[in-house]
Amino acid sequence: MGRATLVIMAAGIGSRFGGGIKQLAPVGPNGEIIMDYSIYDAVEAGFDKVVFVIRKDLEKDFREVIGSRIEQYVDVSYAYQEIEDIPAKYAGKFKDRTKPWGTGQAILCCKDVVDTPFLVINADDYYGKEAYREAYRYLTEKKDTDTIEICMVGFVLKNTLSDNGGVTRGVCRVDENGMLTEIVETHNIEKIGDQALVRSKDGDLIIDKDSPVSMNMWGLAPEFFHILESGFDTFLENTARDDRKAEYLLPTLIGQLLQEKVLSVKVLKSQDQWFGVTYKEDRETVVNAVNRLVREGIYPKRLFGDK
């Protein structure tokens, strides 16, 4: 069995949930949070290490809520995403910055603790078992290609919509060989009956509900850190001193590299239902879904033994 690492981006959790990770509401029958299910599915698929990308000020809470418990079952490391963690030559330029630098920087923070192919996920999204199996298989098989090839797990749009309002999704265009050609960031996609549509003053735009979409689940190799590093340098060089909101985003960088033909992206397919809490009303949907999966025997009642 090949080695592979699961990288969980969790540095933004505190800001979204009011300061600390204790606000991450339990969704499972024994107080499990969404991350528990992600880690369980990844380990079951073959991943042998988990790296949490967090802010240093969240570490105590994070270890308490999940880290210390998970360490008993899988190799765990931490990487820290801080605003000031940028090349020294830019420190003066962005000394007033208060907003983190985005997902591209989050992954770059892992370069000293990740030395195997790795899968990147969001901390508070539930992806389902098939995604991890597909990603593990891809990441641990030999590639017959001279170019840099990465992968993305694509989900079916209808399996990612919310009953409680519009969502933003990266709608993917995929060629006949299963390779990504373009991601179109599409805002405010609503679930209306059995349709997916975007409302606008010019009329409703219907989107094929079976379209593949990106949910920020990327499979990368350690060589990608070099690309991230030079990309981050270019990004900081080109960002205005007074632009306090600019973010170095992984999908944006991958989109640029795709256009420049620097890399290719294999789109893996998952038919599983994706869950996330975009709206506070979504939490009830997630709790019901997880409990149904437990009742159906997809998950044990206690994921990692007694807690």
Image (tube, grey):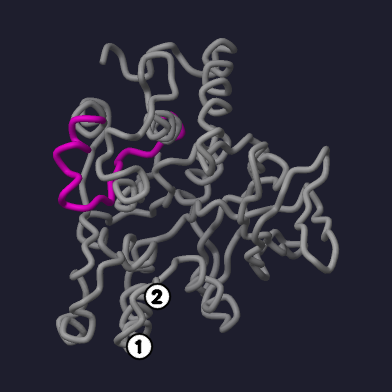
Q: Secondary structure at mark 1?
A: loop
Q: Which residue is mark 1?
A: 240
Q: Which residue is mark 2?
A: 246
Q: Secondary structure at mark 2?
A: loop
Q: Residue at x 51, y 39 (%)?
A: 277
Q: Amino acid at mark 2?
A: Ala
Q: Residue at x 22, y 86 (%)?
A: 93
Q: Nearer the viewer, residue 21 or 298?
A: 21
Where does the image place residue 110, in percent across and percent down from the top left? 26, 58
Left or right of 289? Residue 98 is left
Q: Residue at x 43, y 48 (%)?
A: 121
Where does the image place residue 3, in percent across and percent down from the top left? 35, 45
Q: Nearer the viewer, residue 104 or 62?
A: 62
Quadrant for the C terminus, please. Answer: top left
- Numbered circles on residues, count: 2
Left or right of 120? Residue 290 is right
Q: CA distance from mark 2 to mark 1?
A: 9 Å
Does the magenta segment cover residue 57? yes
Callout 1 environment at 10 Å: few (<14), some (14 to 19), or many (20+)?
Answer: few
Q: Which mark is residue 120?
A: none
* Magenta span of residues: 44-65
Query: Is 254 drawn above or below residue 22 in the view shown?
Result: below
Where does the image place residue 180, in percent across and percent down from the top left? 65, 65
Quadrant for the N terminus, please. Answer: top left
Callout 2 environment at 10 Å: few (<14), some (14 to 19), or many (20+)?
Answer: some
Quarter-of-image position of residue 234: bottom left
Quarter-of-image position of residue 205: bottom right
* Circle 2/circle 1 CB separation < 8 Å: yes
Q: Amino acid at mark 1?
A: Ala
Query: Is 19 drawn above or below residue 198 in the view shown?
Result: above
